[in-house]
Image (tube, helix red, strand yellow):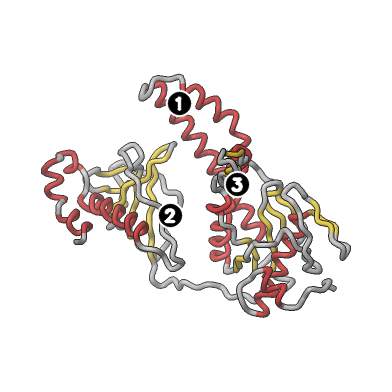
Amino acid sequence: MQWQSVQLADLKNTKRLFSEYKNLDSQVLQDVINRVESAFANFTTPDKNGNRRGKPRFKGKHYYTSLTYPELSQLDIKKDTQDNTCVNLAKIGLISLVFHRSLPDGFTVKTGTVIKEADGFYLCLTLEDKSVPVTVAEIPPTEENSLGIDFGLTNYAYLSKGERIENPRFLRIAAQKLAKLQQRLAKKVKFSRPGQILKGKIARLHQHIARRRLDFQFKLAYRIFDNCDVLFVEDLKIKNMTRRAQPKISNDGSWEHNNQSAKSGLNKSLLDAAHGQFLDVLKYVAWKLGKNVVEVNPKGTSQYCWNCLENVPKDLSDRWHSCSCGQELDRDYNSAKLIKKIGLVSESGGGTPSLKTALASGKKKPAP
C-alpha cells in the first residue's frame, strides 16, 4: 500500500476533523506529506553506495520551521498599494519582503519556501532556466595550475605552496558568552516569557557564529581559486571522525577509561572547524568559476614524506616532519604537498587518487 497516496487523499478528512488545517494551503499540506515520504524512503532505501539515512524522528510544532509553496511564480511577486515589493502567499495574503538581489532575466520561479530563522523570516526561491547548460569543467592538472590543501585544527588549512591559514575557532571564541546565557536560561521557569527571550538570544548567537564561519569559508575559497585551477583535497569522513570513543573492557570484565572527555573536546573542535561544510563550499565555488576539485584518499597522508614517499611515523602530538631525505617542515605542509603529489600521479596514471596508487607508480625517489 502506498501510504503517501493514502495520506494525500485523506487531507479532506483531516481538515474536517481539525479546523485549523483549513487555514493552510492545500499544496503546503501536500508538501509536508511528501517530506515525510522522502524521510522514510531515505531511511529504508540505500543509496548507490549502500548507505542509508538515519531513522526519521517526530518533529514537534516548535521545530517545524519552514513551509513550501510548490507552485509559486513571478506572478505572485507584485507591488502593493504603497509600492512595496510583496509576495502573495495562498491563505496568508500579501507579505512585504526585501529582495537579497533581483531575479535574473530568463529564470522562472518554481517554488518558494518560507523559513523561520532566529532573526526573522526568509523566503527562499527556487529558480529555473532550461537554457543554462549544466557542465563540469575538465581541466588537466599540472604542477603549475594545481594546489594541494590539508585540513587540520592547529592550522585550519595548509596549502602546498606554503601558505598557512589560521583556525578562526568561531565557536570557541563565543563559548564563554554562550555559556553565560545558557546558565541564565537554566534558572528560568520553563516556557516563561524571560526564558523565551533568552532562548532567542542564544539562537541569534548561534546564528551569528554560523554566518561568520560560512562567510570566512566563502572568502577563503575564492582566494584559493585565484591561485589555481585544480585543487586536490582530502576526502574526509567527518561523521566517522566525530564518533564517540570505543568502550574499553579489562580482562576481569570491568570498564576502563577510554578518554571520552578528550574525544568530546576534539569532536567539538572538528565540528567548529566544519571542514565538511568547507569542502561543499569549495566544490560550489569551483563549479561557479569553472574550476575543479579533486578528492584524494586521506589515508597515510600524514605518515609519509612528500619528497621520497618513505614512511615517517608520527603521533598526533608530533607537529614536525623530519625525513632521512633531508625534508624538514611542518607536518601539515608536508601533507599538503603530498596530497598534491598523489593527485598529480593518480591523474596522470589513472585510478583513484590515493597514496597506494602513488606508491604503486614506482615514484619512490626524491623529486628533482
The percent coordinates of residue 210 (x first, y second) are 53, 43
Q: Is residue 341 above or below residue 37?
A: below
Q: Quadrant of residue 346?
A: bottom right
Number of the front mark, 2 or 3: 3
Q: Is residue 31 visible?
A: yes
Tell me the element at label 2: loop
Number of the front mark, 1 or 3: 3
Dot 1 surroundings within 10 Å: few (below 14), some, or many (20 or more)? Answer: some
Q: Quadrant of the N terminus?
A: bottom left
Task: Tell me the residue at 87%/65% (across/down).
Answer: 325
Q: Is residue 363 above or below residue 266?
A: below
Q: Is residue 125 left or right of residue 219?
A: left
Q: Is residue 27 left or right of residue 366?
A: left
Mark 3, residue position: 270
Taking the view exactly as shown, the residue that stands out farthest to the front is 252
Q: Quadrant of residue 96?
A: top left
Residue type beneath disc 1: Leu
The percent coordinates of residue 324 (x first, y second) are 87, 63
| Callouts 2 and 3 close, C-beta under 8 Å | no
Q: Nearer the viewer, residue 222 or 67?
A: 67
Distance between mark 2 and mark 3 Cα atoms: 37 Å
Q: Which sits earlier in the primary sequence, circle 1 or circle 3?
A: 1
Q: Which sits earlier in the primary sequence, circle 2 or circle 3?
A: 2
Distance between mark 1 and mark 2 Cα atoms: 35 Å
Q: Nearer the viewer, residue 274 or 89?
A: 274
Tell me the element at label 3: helix
Q: Is residue 98 left or right of residue 3?
A: right
Q: Is residue 277 visible?
A: no
Tell me the element at label 1: helix
Mark 1, residue position: 198
Q: Which sits earlier in the primary sequence, circle 1 or circle 2?
A: 2
Mark 2, residue position: 102
